């Protein structure tokens, strides 16, 4: 990258800078015209100069201006106007000039602002582009938060500076020079004094500023380190909690903040000192004029008129000069920041942009063998991980790589995946160095999965298909406003040197995955998910999530069929009492009283329990039949039971988990309530106390809590209230409450609740496990399992995939690699988080099923479990960075070598 | 079945006979009520132990795997507790328990059970009594088996 900011700005915005200079020059004409006008108005029409006789006229708008070096120029010959007309005309011209000047200012500022923003966009993009091209080793040295700060904050002032980079010095320099020349013209020696002081300012101030710049640089570095540390604290929060080192971190941060404070304080002190000296020098010049000029005048060597003229002219000098010095300060400041950033991003062995060039067409198959020649890889301390290895992996060959950890097996896999670059030797395909091949070949035809996974924030689907998003493959047709918007976006991108790739295009390369489009994607996704044994997890995620009925109508339209199938199946297996279904005219004993009343779900967050309880309609329904009073006494009974059971327990006692309707903190409050209300009638309670008591009854489930509070009469009353509640439901509640309807999908309930359409009985041993298996079976039988997977794939994986378990992440990582259908699949101990048994099962699945479906890639698998080596065509054994054995499983077993030791 | 009936049943279990009814009610409330069909398994040999079961009604077979297949070691009936040893000493299940009739049980999770023991020393003593009793039984059986073996050998 260009080291000098000024040159960087000039080379990227040359034409714009010249244009804005021209515009500024042109804007000077109305600016200077407006100086002369007030004098004309006062002297002319107001004081009457030139209008001495009544009815006299004057030439209006005869504009002549004395431009330095050009001479007198006549712009306009003028009109004959009376005194009053002249006053109006001149005033209007003044107004016009005000508007013109304002418009020029508006245009110039907008233009400069836009120029700056484009520049900022360009710099930021260029920096990120470089991050994408950093060699792998660079990432061991940099902290992500520091890079982010540099790109986000540190380059920010450069945008603001870009617009002023050339215009400001030209403008201010011109003004200052004019003033100085004018002074010299009045009196040469006094002019020389002024010039001398300016020269001193020009020499001394920048020198003093050197220290300011150094401090500014330190401020930038320490601030960047601070953000790096903050990033570390966030990433390592588990380690900090686990080791009780939070105070160590506090101390570290406090020390850093102290350092930053001292630097910034120093900076302020210097800044104001420099300002003081600067001001002093500026003020000293008039002193010299008065004293020396005065002496000269007294001696009669200087005309008093000249002295006054000089002093007057000097008024115009310090203003522009000060601004010029400020501009220079800003320039140096930005230049230092820029140099700092560039230094961090100027990295050796940056990946050539050609390697990452966009390739919309599918890459051809790799039909040649992967050949490591004399390969040596060193770790950061210089110790060899791989020591002069030569090995050839043929297409379609399955190879088990075996060795203890740190034997070199992992390093070989990483080198094949281009994650580490060889220190000596090379890896070639058909004679071409792997590192010289474009990523459009290696990133598509070679797949790699290791234990450290990375998932981007987004849905599971986005992450699973991430390995297929190489280029925008469809052209999106925009219409109307969007088309204009798109065009504008593309134009701006081009102007700031950004690429014109459309993020809204479908990037997924379906052809490479072996399908024709999004509709038959599951043809390949499903076997892969099954192979890594994660479909069950995804089914569970789907069951627990709310379903978008618009995008998953294939399933939601068949919900009735699903519910029926589940009922039939449960009946067939003699498990009818596992699920108690919702029936409009029956009380469901396994659901809470609240659920039984509502008989539906609330659309959260628009509607909550609290809001419903306060709703007048809901209250009026409860009041009829005195259900309100029944529930009140029931709540009282529940409270007294709970208090009796739990009053002696300390608040953190594990038994409180069972208490679903209140927390340990509520107990004392209810104890007091009970003392007041027990044995007295409904009327004794205030409205707030009533609702506190009734609230308890809403969460009551008889088979679970077993207080014996429900009887047939009460249940009938509740079912009756339910019917009345839904009968005249007002419009505002209709919108936010979905009634349970056996014929309809309930969009505000989870998929599980929708399929069950009832509640699982509490007393059923292993009920949920059984249901899970049964449901999977039913989904399969009805051909809906893929729709369920599709719902599950909408799951948001969270930042860095942290909403998934480690086991799920590793499985998905392997799935992602498999989906690419590469020619070389490299697995580097990809599943250590899993039980050995599951790891073996997945390896078997991949080796036996996937490899036999026609497309037969070469598989290079660094095994954790040596006994799996028999699944592979060939076994290579590493020990201490050297390749020690190479052959089929059988021959190596016969040999009494390292492999046999490892296998035993 | 309601909480108070369960409390009555728990009182008949020797292990809990010394515990105040209020505490039994708490125990019943915090435990899970589970029902099993005949032939359904409460837990399998080798499973990690996470709960003890109080049989409220019905009966179950205790089965152990042996080289010659599954053998029935004992049968338990209502008012008895099963599975408590494994959660006390953190071992996996030493036997399989399978209902041989429709069975109702209270499932007391491991944490709750341990907490109960530390809260109520009388229960701990009762547990110790039961364990000591079993140990002496086992010792007697062992010595009988040994002496039989000796007689066998000397013949």
Image (tube, helix red, strand yellow):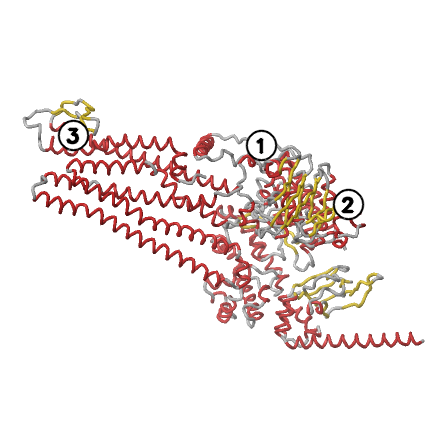
Q: Which residue is mark 2?
A: A888
**Pointer 3 and pointer 1: residues touching (CB < 8 Å)?**
no
Horizontal and vertical percent for residue A759? 63, 54
Chain ID of residue with mark 3: A
Real-space Cα distance between discs 3 and 1? 68 Å
Is there any visible trace of residue A744 in the rendered image? Answer: no
Give the secondary structure at mark 3.
helix
User: Helix or strand or loop: what does disc 2 sit on?
Assistant: loop
- Provide the residue designation for mark 3: A88
Q: Measure the C-alpha gap from mark 3 to mark 2.
A: 105 Å
- Residue plotted at (31% across, 55% down): A269
Observer able to see residue A229: yes
Task: Classify residue A340 as left or right of residue A515.
Answer: left
Residue shown at 19% from the left, 23% from the top = A76
Label 3 or label 2, whichever comes before in sequence order = 3
Q: Position of residue A814 (x, y in %)?
A: 65, 46
Q: Residue A161's quadrant in the figure?
A: top left
Percent across and percent down for residue B109 are: 65, 65
What residue is disc 1 on?
A360
| Picture disc at residue A415 | none
Q: From the viewer's side, name the closer residue of A123 and A837.
A: A123
Asked whether disc 1 touches disc 2, contact meaning CB atoms under 8 Å apart, the reply is: no
Q: Tell me if residue A253 comes above or below residue A776 in the rendering.
A: below
**Tag 1, which chain?**
A
Quadrant showing the N terminus of chain A: top left
Name the secondary structure under disc 1.
loop
């Amino acid at each position: 990258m260009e080291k000098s900011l000024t040159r960087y700005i000039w080379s990227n915005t040359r034409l714009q800078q010249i244009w804005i200079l021209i515009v500024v020059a042109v804007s000077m004409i109305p600016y200077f015209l407006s100086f002369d006008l007030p004098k004309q108005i006062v002297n002319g029409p107001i004081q009457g100069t030139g209008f001495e006789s009544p009815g006299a006229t004057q030439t209006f708008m005869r504009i002549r201006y004395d431009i330095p070096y050009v001479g007198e120029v006549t712009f306009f010959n003028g009109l004959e106007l009376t005194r009053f007309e002249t006053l109006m005309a001149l005033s209007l011209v003044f107004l016009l000039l005000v508007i013109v000047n304002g418009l020029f200012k508006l245009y110039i500022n907008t233009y400069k602002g836009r120029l700056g923003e484009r520049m900022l966009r360009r710099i930021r993009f260029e920096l990120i582009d470089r991050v994408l091209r950093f060699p792998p080793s660079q990432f061991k040295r940099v902290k992500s938060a520091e890079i982010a700060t540099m790109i986000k904050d540190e380059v920010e002032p450069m945008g603001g500076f870009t617009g002023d980079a050339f215009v400001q010095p030209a403008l201010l320099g011109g003004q200052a020079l004019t003033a100085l020349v004018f002074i010299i013209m009045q009196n040469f020696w006094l002019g020389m004094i002024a010039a001398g002081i300016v020269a001193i300012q020009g020499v001394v101030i920048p020198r003093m500023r050197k220290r300011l710049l150094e401090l500014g640089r330190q401020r930038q570095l320490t601030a960047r380190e601070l953000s790096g540390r903050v990033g570390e604290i966030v990433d390592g929060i588990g380690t900090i909690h686990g080791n009780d080192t939070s105070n160590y971190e506090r101390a570290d941060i406090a020390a850093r903040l102290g350092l930053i404070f001292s630097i910034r304080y120093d900076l302020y002190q210097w800044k104001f000192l420099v300002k003081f000296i600067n001001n002093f020098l500026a003020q000293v010049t008039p002193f010299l004029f008065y004293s020396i000029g005065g002496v000269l005048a007294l001696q009669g060597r200087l005309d008093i008129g000249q002295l006054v003229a000089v002093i007057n002219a000097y008024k115009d000098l310090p203003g522009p000069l000060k601004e010029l010095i400020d501009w220079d300060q800003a320039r140096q400041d930005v230049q230092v920041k820029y140099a700092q950033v560039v230094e961090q991003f100027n990295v050796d062995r940056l990946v050539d942009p050609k390697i990452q060039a966009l390739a919309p067409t599918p890459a051809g198959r790799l039909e040649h063998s992967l050949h490591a020649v004399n390969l040596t890889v060193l770790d950061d301390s210089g110790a060899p991980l791989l020591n002069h290895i030569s090995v050839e992996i043929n297409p379609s060959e399955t190879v088990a790589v075996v060795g203890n950890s740190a034997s070199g097996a992992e390093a070989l896999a990483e080198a094949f995946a281009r994650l580490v670059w060889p220190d000596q030797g090379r890896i070639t395909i058909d004679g071409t160095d792997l590192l010289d091949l474009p990523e459009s070949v290696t990133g598509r035809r070679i797949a790699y999965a290791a234990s450290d996974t990375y998932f981007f924030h987004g849905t599971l689907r986005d992450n699973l298909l991430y390995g297929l998003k190489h280029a925008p493959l469809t052209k999106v047709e925009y219409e109307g406003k969007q088309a204009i918007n798109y065009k504008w976006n593309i134009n701006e991108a081009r102007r700031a040197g950004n690429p014109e790739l459309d993020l809204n295009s479908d990037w997924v390369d379906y052809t490479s995955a072996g399908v024709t489009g999004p509709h038959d994607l599951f043809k390949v996704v499903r076997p892969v998910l099954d192979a890594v044994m994660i479909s069950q997890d995804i089914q569970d995620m789907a069951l627990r999530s709310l379903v978008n009925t618009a995008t998953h109508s294939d399933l939601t339209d068949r919900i009735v069929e699903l519910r029926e199938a589940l009922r039939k199946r449960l009946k067939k297996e003699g498990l009818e009492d596992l699920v108690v279904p919702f029936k409009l005219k029956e009380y469901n004993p396994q659901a809470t009283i609240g659920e039984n009343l509502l008989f539906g779900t609330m659309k959260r967050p628009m509607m909550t329990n609290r809001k419903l309880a306060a709703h007048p309609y809901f209250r009026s329904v409860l009041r009829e039949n005195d259900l309100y009073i029944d529930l009140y006494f029931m709540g009282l009974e529940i409270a007294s039971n709970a208090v009796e059971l739990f009053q002696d327990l300390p608040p953190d006692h594990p038994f409180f988990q069972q208490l679903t309707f209140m927390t340990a903190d509520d107990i004392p409050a209810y104890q007091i309530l009970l003392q007041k209300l027990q044995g007295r009638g409904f009327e004794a309670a205030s409205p707030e106390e009533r609702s506190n008591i009734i609230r308890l009854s809403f969460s009551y489930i008889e088979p679970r809590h077993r207080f014996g509070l429900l009887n047939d009469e009460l249940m009938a009353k509740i079912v009756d209230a339910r019917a009345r509640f839904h009968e005249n439901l007002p419009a505002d509640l209709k919108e936010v409450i979905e009634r349970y309807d056996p014929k309809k999908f309930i969009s505000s309930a989870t998929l599980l609740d929708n399929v069950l359409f009832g509640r699982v009985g509490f007393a059923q041993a292993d009920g949920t496990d059984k249901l899970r298996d049964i449901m999977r079976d039913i989904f399969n039988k009805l051909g809906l399992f893929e729709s369920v997977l599709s719902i599950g794939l909408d799951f948001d994986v969270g930042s860095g995939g942290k909403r998934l378990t480690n086991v799920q992440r590793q499985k998905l990582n392997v799935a992602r690699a498999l989906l690419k259908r590469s020619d070389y699949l490299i697995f580097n101990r990809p599943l250590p988080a899993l039980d050995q048994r599951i790891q073996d099962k997945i390896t078997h699945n991949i080796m036996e099923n996937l490899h036999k479906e026609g497309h037969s890639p070469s598989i290079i698998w660094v095994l954790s479990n040596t006994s799996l080596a028999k699944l592979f065509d060939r076994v290579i054994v590493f020990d201490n960075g050297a390749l020690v054995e190479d052959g089929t499983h059988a021959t190596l077993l016969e040999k009494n070598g390292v492999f046999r030791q490892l296998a035993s | 079945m309601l909480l108070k009936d369960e409390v009555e049943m728990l009182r008949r279990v020797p292990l809990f006979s010394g515990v105040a009814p209020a505490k039994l009610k708490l125990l019943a409330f915090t435990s899970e009520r589970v029902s099993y069909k005949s032939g359904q398994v409460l837990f399998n040999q080798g499973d990690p132990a996470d709960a003890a079961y109080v049989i409220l009604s019905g009966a179950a077979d205790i089965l152990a795997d042996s080289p010659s297949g599954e053998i029935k070691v004992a049968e338990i009936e209502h008012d008895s507790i099963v599975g408590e040893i494994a959660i006390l000493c953190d071992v996996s299940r030493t036997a399989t328990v399978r209902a041989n009739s429709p069975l109702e049980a209270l499932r007391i999770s491991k944490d709750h059970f341990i907490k109960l023991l530390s809260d109520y020393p009388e229960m701990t003593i009762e547990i110790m009594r039961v364990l000591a009793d079993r140990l002496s039984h086992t010792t007697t059986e062992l010595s009988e088996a040994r002496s039989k073996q000796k007689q066998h050998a000397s013949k």
